[in-house]
């Protein structure tokens, strides 16, 4: 009896998926570092903090 040929498709698809996920993780890490260094989300003063709190808690009409 002859051996069944090994499929190459599944390992290639798995490698592509893992490479894509790894690339997405690296982009996320780089973006987080850049945002932290550039202070994109800076400190919020008390007046703005209170306004945000009121907007979030008040239901829309």
Image (cartoon, rainbow, N blue to C red):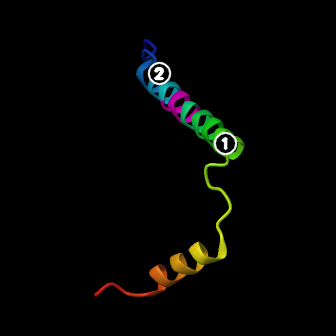
Image position of 8 (left or right of 61): right
User: Which residue is more in the foreground, 33 or 5?
Assistant: 33
Q: Which residue is mark 2?
A: 12
Magenta stretch, residue numbers: 17-22
Q: Is residue 18 magenta?
A: yes
Q: CA distance from mark 2 to mark 1?
A: 39 Å
* Of marks 2 and 1, the one in the foreground: 1
Q: Is residue 22 above or below residue 43?
A: above
User: Does the residue at mark 2 contact the one at mark 1 (Cβ under 8 Å)?
Assistant: no
Q: Quadrant of the C terminus?
A: bottom left
Picture quadrant of residue 19: top right
* Label 1 neighbour load within 10 Å: few <14, some 14-19, many 20+: few
Task: Specify the farthest residue to the top.
Answer: 2
User: Which residue is more in the foreground, 45 or 16?
Assistant: 45
Picture quadrant of residue 60: bottom left
- Which mark, residue 38? 1
Q: Secondary structure at mark 2?
A: helix
Position in image of residue 23 (x %, y %): 56, 30
Q: Secondary structure at mark 1?
A: helix
Position in image of residue 11 (x %, y %): 50, 24
């Amino acid at each position: 009896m002859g051996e069944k040929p090994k499929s190459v498709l599944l390992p290639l698809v798995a490698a592509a998926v893992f490479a894509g996920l790894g690339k997405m993780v690296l982009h996320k890490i780089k973006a987080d570092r850049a945002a932290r260094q550039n202070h994109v989300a800076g400190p919020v003063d008390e007046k703005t903090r209170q306004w945000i709190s009121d907007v979030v808690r008040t239901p829309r009409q």
